[in-house]
Image: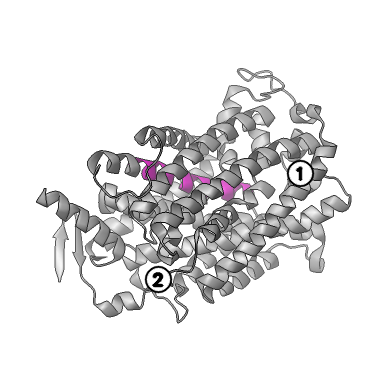
Amino acid sequence: MTTSHGAVEEHLESAGYLQKRQLKSGSAGWILLAGLGVSYVVSGDYSGWNFGLAQGGFGGLAIAAVVIAGMYLALVLGMAELSSALPAAGGGYTFARRALGPWGGFATGTAILIEYAIAPAAIATFIGAYVESLGLFGITDGWWVYLAAYVLFIGIHLSGVGEALKVMFVITAIALVGLVIFAAFAAGHFDATNLTNIPVDADAAGASTFLPHGYLGIWAAIPFAIWFFLAIEGVPLAAEETANPERNVPRGIIAAITVLLITCAGVLILTTGAGGAEQMSSSGNPLVEALGNGTAAKVVNYIGLAGLIASFFSIIYAYSRQLFALSRAGYLPTRLSLTNSRKAPTLALIVPGVVGFLLSLTGKGALLLNMAVFGAALSYVLMMVSHIVLRWREPEMRRPYRTPGGAITTGFALVIAVLAVIATFLVDSVAALSCLVVFAAFMAYFALYSRHRLIANSPDEEFAMLAEAESELK
């Protein structure tokens, strides 16, 4: 059966089609989801954010971090509402599909997929830097580390979501303990003069010791401030594998952002104050270097590796679920959504992993970071637009959780997300333009091919079609 719907065509698949594309339901409660949200992000506390010191100094990065923290809090509150109303594995794609139609849904899913496919590659380069600094196994060339990480952790995910989430939770707990240990020792090394030791650019407008590169440095630091929170929006991707998702997904993502707001403030202030803004601005493992060469530094170095692994491990989960949802609905080749006997999406785990490994071989963590941030910021724009549209167009839609402040809250997140997209071009136009080309290629694929082959009875399409039918009846 084939139906034409606007600019797209949809057809029904047999029950067998969906049976081969099922995830394991009821595998996680809100505590595991909170752990998942923290694990997505915790590597950003250990490395990556500090490159923003080179762009804006401590002052510029601190102001950018406050603004971005506000954006993510508003974003999370908006996503908590959307995930309670539309609990499906597509996450942001599902929300945008309901609000903005097939084109908007696929655009959002593509932006998220770009973010999640590239972010592990950036994290792999940071894992390599930590392993080399520890002198483990005599490794001096990171590519062996990148390969081992991808093979090992994709393998664990293939064993099933319940097992994977439990492993992730333990690793994340270790990473958080590492941050507590770091904070205890860094406080003893703290020197306020270290915060402002970057030379002032006298030619920059508004330049001072607090803002060594002037006002523009604040804007340039935004993509690096995002690294403190990047990927937390992936929690709703676990909706189909969660017990009582309407209640547990909002609780999990809000608990996660609460923890991350605390770790962001502590890491930014203590690392810069202990190690010095100039010294930390180009470090591959800033928390370790901030503590010097003592025992505490070695302990944090080992635990920091756990933090990087936690994010690497969990974002693999995220990219596989986003690719699974897009493939199951026909936006991407349907073979990619097939699940194995343990209900893990095999090719959705492996294919982006191969792409990410090849990207990690560049060794350019900062470049890859900016590419991931571009995809993330673009998806935030589209998801916040989706929240606002649904509040306006479907005010009666069932929402077990409602965003405090409603569209005003998500409107704030939307404005900051737009500025963040622009900032990625300011910091690294090559990274942003490269992602824009990839995004355009995906959209061309949809325009020329997959929009004629969507699966009408996939969960995400059914959500949208039911809404459209109800609207027509009214």
The residue depicted at 60 percent of the width and 46 percent of the height is 259
- Of residues 333 and 10, the one drawn nearer to the viewer in this rendering: 10
Identify which residue, 145 or 66, lies in the foreground: 66
Q: Where is residue 379 shown, x and y percent of the image?
A: 42, 47
Total labels drawn: 2
Q: Which residue type does callout 1 highlight?
A: Ala
Among the two numbered marks 2 and 1 on one chain, the one whose residue lies closer to the N terminus: 1
Q: Which residues are magenta?
A: 366-385
Q: Determine the image quadrant of residue 415.
A: top left
Provide the secondary structure element on which disc 2 rests: helix
Q: Nearer the viewer, residue 437 or 406?
A: 406
Q: Residues within 10 Å of mark 1 (few under 14, many from 20)?
A: some
| Residue farthest along the right direction in this orientation | 294
In the picture provided, is 204 more to the left or to the right than 98? right
Q: x, y percentage for residue 369? A: 58, 48
Residue under pointer 1? 183
Mark 2 burial class by Cα count in 10 Å: few <14, some 14-19, many 20+: many
> Taking 328 as reference, is 205 above or below it?
above
Where in the figure is residue 207, as x and y percent of width and height?
66, 19
Q: Quadrant of the image for the N terminus?
A: bottom left
**Whole-Å distance between the Cαs marked 2 and 1?**
43 Å
Residue 290 appearing in the image: no
Q: Which residue is mark 2?
A: 336
Residue 246 lies, with reference to residue 271, above or below; the image says: below
* Residue 377 inside the magenta-drawn segment: yes
SS for tag 1? helix
